[in-house]
Amino acid sequence: MENLDVLDSDLASSSELSLNAAAKDFLRQTGKWAKLLAITSIIFSLIIIIIGLFFGTIMGAISSLGGQNMPNMYAGSLGVFMAVFYGIIGLVMMYPGIRLLQFSSKTKQALEMNNAEAISEAFRRLRSVFRFYGIIVIIYLALFALMFLSVGIGALR
């Protein structure tokens, strides 16, 4: 019986991958959705960066809405820290959006030209998106573990 497993580990040495019409259609649709997600991700990242740049001004305006003339605690070094913090977060969160946009354009190019190199490059971009989110999840899990550990140690005292 012939081995029909397309995703075999020695695929590169034995044969070339070919996609049927359904697989190409799925990739085309995935590329379109990736483009939508990429554009919205980049826009929201830019909004976060803009909010960071004007954080002190925004917080000063919000604190003056209460009717009382409260001091603007965000005008000094805390405002600068928050601006830098939001700027860094916005730039970091822009990375997967850019990679998704690259995946989308490479997928479209690969399907239009039937180019195996372009589809390989598209999947390389998609892999970097998943790797990024995997690293973020590992960081979150580590922070949660540290939080639970510190709460446990605090509860013992």
Image (tube, rainbow, N blue to C red):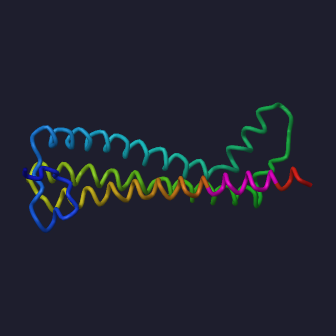
Q: Is residue 59 above or below residue 78?
A: above
Q: Residue furthest bottom?
A: 13
How many numbered discs sit on the rendered protein? Answer: 0
Q: Position of residue 9 (x, y in %)?
A: 22, 62
- The answer to whether residue 88 is above or below residue 20 is below
Would residue 10 be found to the left or right of residue 95 on screen? left
Q: Position of residue 39 (x, y in %)?
A: 37, 44
| Residue nearest the observer in this picture, 83 or 5 | 5
Q: Quadrant of residue 69?
A: top right
Front one among 56 and 157: 157
Report the predominant secondary structure element of the magenta stretch: helix
Determine the image quadrant of residue 85: bottom right
Q: Which residues are magenta?
A: 142-152
Q: Residue at x 72, y 40 (%)?
A: 61
Residue furthest out toward the front: 1
Tell me, yes or no, whether the highlighted magenta stretch contains residue 146: yes
Q: Position of residue 132 (x, y in %)?
A: 45, 57
Q: At 26% across and 41% down in the image, what residue appears?
A: 30
Measuring from the top left, give residue 110's x and y in whole percent.
Answer: 15, 53
- Image position of 110 with respect to 14: above or below: above
Q: Residue furthest right?
A: 157
Task: Residue at 76%, 33% (x, y): give it.
Answer: 65
Residue at the top extreme of this rendering? 67
The C terminus: image quadrant: bottom right
Is residue 69 rendered magenta in the image?
A: no
Q: Which residue is rendered at x = 70% and y = 50% of the image?
A: 56
